[in-house]
Image: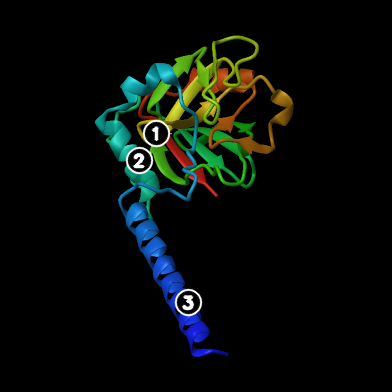
Amino acid sequence: MPAKVDDQISRSVMFLCMGTAAVLLLVQWGSANGLFSFRHKQMAGIVRGDRKAVLQNPVATNAKAAIAAPTPTPSPKVIPQTDARLVVSLSDRQVTLYRGSSVQATYPIAVAQAGWETPTGTFQVLNKEQNPIFVHPITGEEIPPGADNPLGVAWVGFWTDGESEIGFHGTNQEELIGEAVSHGCLRMRNADIEAIYAQVSEGTPVVVQP
C-alpha cells in the first residue's frame, strides 16, 4: 500500500479517536453538571396538588430522611390521641390494628408493584383526610372525590418526601385488594379505611414490615 494512503488512514484513525474522546468528555461533563440525564426519575407514592404547599415543612424533611437512611428514623414525635398502632406485613398483604398489646382487627391490603415499593421501617401518621383529591403520579391527571377517585373515601398518610406521599387509602377497585398494584401506597376496602380512620390520629405509630 502506498505510503500516502497509509498516512491518510493513520490521520483518519487519529481524528476518530480524538473525536470519540471529546464526545465522551462532553457527555461526562454534561452529566456531572445536570445537562444530560439518562435515568428516569421514578417517584414513589402519589402527588396531590392541593397538598404540595403543606408538604414543604420539617416533617417532610425528616420523613424523607427516614426512607433514605439504611435504618429508617421516625418523624418528629407527635403525641397520638389514642394508644392505637398499625403494623403492616407486606408479604402477608395485611395491616393489623393494635390498641396497646391487643389486636383489634386485621385488614387485607393491596401493596406496591415492583419498582414502586413501600419503604419499610417505623413511621407515624402524618395526616388524615376524607374524600381526598387524587393526582396521578405519572400523567398528572387530577381526579376529584367521587366514584372514579382511586383514593376512595379516606386517606391516612405516613410518609412524604415533600412532593409525593405514601399512605393508606380506600379504592374504587376493591377487587384488586390483595394484589401488588399500587405506586407505593397501601390500598384498602373503603369500609376498612373508614374503620382505621376513626381509630388513629396524627402521631399514631405505623410499622411497615417486609
Would you name the residue on which mark 2 appears?
64
Q: Tell me what residue is drawn at x 47 percent, y 74 percent.
A: 12
Callout 1: few (<14), some (14-19), or many (20+) C-alpha neighbours within 10 Å? many
Residue type of the residue flagged with mark 1: Thr
Instruction: Confirm or deny contact between disc 1 and disc 2 (CB under 8 A).
Output: yes
Tell me the element at label 1: strand
Tell me the element at label 3: helix
Which one is in front in this view, the residue at disc 1 or the one at disc 3?
A: 3
**Residue 94 left/right relative to 203:** right
Callout 2: few (<14), some (14-19), or many (20+) C-alpha neighbours within 10 Å? some
Q: Quadrant of the N terminus?
A: bottom right
Q: Quadrant of residue 32?
A: bottom left
Q: Nearer the viewer, residue 187 or 197?
A: 187
Mark pair 1, 3: CA separation: 53 Å
Q: Tell me what residue is drawn at x 40 percent, y 48 percent.
A: 36
Counting from the top left corner in percent of width and height, residue 38 is at: 47, 50
199, above or below 108, in the image: above
**Residue 200 left/right relative to 115:** left
Tell me the element at label 2: helix
| Residue 81 in sight here | no
